[in-house]
Image (cartoon, rainbow, N blue to C red):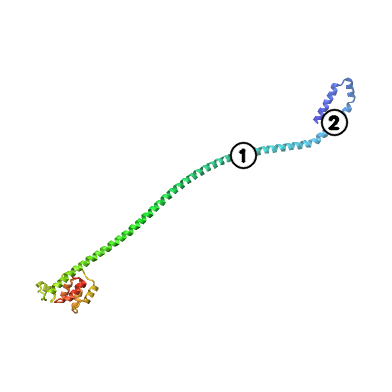
Amino acid sequence: MCHWYRVFLAASVSVWLSGNAADAQAVDADLPGQAHALRQVISTMESEVAELQPRLDMAREQLADLTRQIDEATQQLESRRRDLSSLQADRDKLHAAIAEGQADQQRQQDALQAAGAELADVTAQVQDASAELAGIAQQQAALDARSAELASEIDGREKRSGELAEEVRQLTAELAALARVRDMAQEPDEPAPPLPPAAESAAPAGQQALAPPQQPRDPAQVDAALALAPALPADPQRARLRGLLIEGHCATDALRQVQDPINRQTLLVLVGRLGGC
């Protein structure tokens, strides 16, 4: 409406300024026609304005809607920018953490390699020590075996030495007894010399005093010797002879307690089997 009104006023002013008096008179005569034309123009303009008003309102609403959308988009853009900045900061932190983790991993790998090398060294030392210990154990076992052999050999020799000493003692006693028997065999039989008064009172009639017994004898060994000896007296003299021999008395002294005179063959068997004393 304003546009057409401004056009009309401009045209009117232009006509008014450029015309002369005659023209002014002509214009005055045509004023009703001009007014009618002007009213038509105004009516047309008002119709156009009425037609344009909804479109203008719609355009204004669209402009307002677009303005709101622009504001929302701007806010979303700012929010996205803030999110992007936060994500970039997180990304930088993550990159830093990854770099630190890689550095830690490298340090751990270096430490692991160093520990592996140290473990290999210790393992080699353990293997060397185990081999040395096995050698020492073998030497110890050999020494123990040799020590056991030597101990057994020493025990055997000590036992044999004791046996030999006992054999020497028995042979010496037998030799002395045989010497006495031989001397007795070379001498004529004589009655036994009278005992001293004290001995006669201590010993029964027909017996002589006994020397203290020595080492006791094995009863089975005594029985075996008595079984081979000839001319033994009957019980109870035989039982007395057996008891004296088991107690450890000399064969000559024990036989003299039950035989008077002594039978030389009996004495030889007893001395040969049991020893003299």
Identify whether 10 is placed above or below 232: above
Asked if one can make out residue 213 in the rendered structure from this viewpoint, the answer is no
Identify whether 191 is placed above or below 159: below
Label 2 SS: helix
Image depth: mark 2 or mark 1 in front: 1
Residue 54 position within the rendered picture, expressed as x and y whole percent measured from the top left: 78, 37
Please indicate whether residue 60 sits to the left or right of residue 181 in the image.
Answer: right
Amino acid of disc 1: Leu
Picture quadrant where residue 215 is located: bottom left
The N terminus: image quadrant: top right
Residue name at image x 37 percent, y 54 percent: 135
Please indicate whether residue 203 sits to the left or right of residue 46 in the image.
Answer: left
Residue 62 position within the rendered picture, expressed as x and y whole percent measured from the top left: 74, 38
- Residue wearing tag 1: 84
The C terminus: image quadrant: bottom left
* Residue furthest bottom in the image: 234
Asked if one can make out residue 33 in the rendered structure from this viewpoint, the answer is yes
Amino acid of disc 2: Val
How many angstroms separate mark 2 from mark 1 (CA)?
Answer: 60 Å
- Residue wearing tag 2: 41
